[in-house]
């Protein structure tokens, strides 16, 4: 059944009373040749199961054991090639049980044929085979780490992000020509289920951060990720022209951001915190708590939302949303001084029906925000002839300034202050 959510055309792929999948992947089953959804339900069924899309039938289910924790598995990854180090063959399922063991489940017998429990496990979450098949990339939601481990549990590298480290996805990387790529320098994405951050792209060999949203320099181009549980990289464009799509558990939707961590499309809403208490509210557009995003075999996007009274639903996004308002932060507590600083890249405004900025001078000297606009479709910052000074916002310490940036192709901003000060610039864009 096809219908619209927030201007996006969607198809419901799975929804069944008593099933609350938190994870799904769309694969061609190496055992049957059918297209299936492999899903994990950590809260209700506490099982991994396979749903045949053509037959509309659950064809396999494995309920995980254990009593150390109350909720798993959060992922169920189907093995698509032989992994001798894990004793896994195509069709087997990788998932975590409720004793914090990462397991390989035999597809035929339903028995656990391999397992490994990290010594410091608190809530084993995701496990993804390394590209060489000799180990795993794992996450622990409560301990707050992502690690590369050998099959015996030996740690190759470990990186801590704090509680909430959730699901992983693999970045496709370069085409054989080495010209097109969807990598920004890393191999895997990890989503961290925290209010302000975040999504991180890591080098599989070293664990080093190649990219993140918000950026590691959190004073520029900040999009608050609002409790993502999963993230994927889409597109295969040159020059970094790809998108990272993540769910927003707290925002009731999903969002696509570009390399500069600026929103491009999505279904989003604000997330409210009152007196330290976080408040989840369903989106007015029809989504409740969106827990997962994944890539379909045809390159489209799938997602999961918990909108049923006793179920969650798996959807395919057939058309991206054509409307909505998006909020991001061009500067966040950034320092300004006597020398002007351009906050490049320019804000592209041509595609948006409205672009509005609001700036707060957080203290110190008088802040001067200079705005330069161009009508050129080529927004070249090195060509001064393209840019016309359109206004200056002078903002006293503790004050606010506001401007609407409509009718141009792009607008450049520069900031300076009579004395050292900090400031923030909030951007609102309506599609």
Image (cartoon, rainbow, N blue to C red):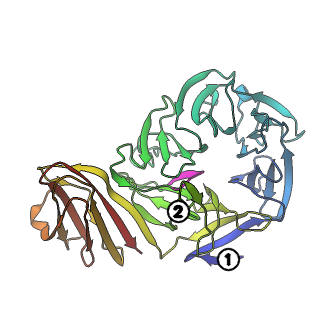
Q: Please say if 195 is above or below 3.
A: above
- The total number of labels drawn is 2
* Quadrant (top left/top right/bottom left/bottom right) for the N terminus: bottom right
Quarter occupied by residue 221: bottom left
Residue range corresponding to the magenta coloring = 226-234
Residue 396 seen anywhere in this rendered image of the structure: yes
Res 342 label: none
Q: Nearer the viewer, residue 369 or 318?
A: 369
| Residue 248 image position (x, y, % from top left) | 56, 59
Q: Are marks 1 and 2 in contact (CB under 8 Å)?
A: no
Residue at the disc numbered 1: 2
* Quadrant (top left/top right/bottom left/bottom right) for the C terminus: bottom left
Residue, x 83% and y 52% (percent of image)?
Answer: 45
**Mark earlier in primary sequence (1, 2):** 1
Q: Please say if 77 is above or below 132.
A: below
Residue at the disc numbered 2: 272
Helix, strand or loop at disc 1?
strand
Q: Which circle, 1 or 2, is nearer the viewer? A: 2
| Residue 37 image position (x, y, % from top left) | 74, 56
Quarter occupied by residue 383: bottom left
Residue, x 86% and y 54% (percent of image)?
Answer: 59
């Amino acid at each position: 059944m096809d219908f619209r959510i927030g201007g996006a055309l969607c198809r419901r792929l799975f929804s069944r009373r008593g099933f609350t999948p938190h994870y799904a992947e769309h694969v061609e089953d190496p055992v049957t040749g059918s297209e299936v959804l492999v899903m994990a339900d950590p809260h209700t069924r506490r099982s991994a199961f396979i749903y045949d899309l053509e037959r509309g039938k659950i064809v396999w289910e494995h309920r995980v054991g254990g009593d150390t924790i109350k909720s798993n598995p959060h992922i169920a990854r189907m093995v698509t090639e032989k992994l001798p180090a894990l004793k896994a063959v195509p069709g087997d399922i990788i998932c975590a049980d409720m004793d914090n063991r990462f397991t390989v489940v035999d597809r035929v017998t339903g028995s656990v044929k391999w397992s490994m429990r990290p010594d410091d496990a608190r809530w084993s979450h995701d496990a993804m085979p390394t590209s060489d098949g000799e180990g795993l990339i794992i996450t622990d939601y409560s301990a707050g780490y992502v690690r590369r481990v050998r099959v015996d549990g030996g740690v190759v590298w470990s990186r801590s992000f704090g509680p909430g480290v959730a699901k992983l996805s693999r970045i496709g990387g370069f085409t054989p020509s080495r010209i097109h790529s969807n990598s920004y320098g890393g191999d895997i994405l990890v989503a961290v289920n925290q209010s302000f951050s975040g999504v991180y792209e890591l080098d599989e060999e070293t664990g080093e951060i190649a990219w993140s949203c918000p950026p590691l320099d959190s004073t520029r181009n900040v999009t608050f990720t609002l409790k993502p549980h999963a993230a994927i990289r889409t597109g295969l464009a040159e020059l970094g022209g790809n998108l990272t799509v993540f769910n927003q558990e707290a925002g009731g939707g999903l969002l696509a951001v570009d390399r500069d961590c600026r929103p491009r499309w999505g279904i989003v809403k604000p997330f409210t915190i009152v007196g330290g208490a976080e408040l989840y509210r369903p989106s007015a557009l029809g989504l409740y708590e969106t827990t997962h995003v994944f890539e379909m075999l045809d390159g489209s996007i799938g997602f999961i939302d918990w909108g049923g009274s006793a179920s969650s639903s798996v959807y395919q996004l057939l058309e991206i949303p054509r409307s909505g308002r998006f909020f991001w932060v061009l500067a966040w507590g950034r320092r300004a001084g006597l020398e002007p600083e351009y906050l490049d890249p320019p804000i592209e405004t041509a595609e948006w029906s409205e672009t509005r900025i609001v700036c707060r001078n957080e203290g110190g000297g008088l802040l001067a925000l200079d705005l330069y606009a161009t009508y050129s479709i080529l927004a070249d910052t090195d060509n001064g002839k393209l840019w016309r000074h359109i206004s200056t916002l002078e903002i006293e310490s503790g004050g606010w300034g506001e401007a609407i940036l409509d009718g141009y192709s792009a607008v450049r901003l520069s900031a300076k202050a009579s004395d050292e000060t900090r400031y923030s610039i909030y951007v609102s864009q309506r599609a």
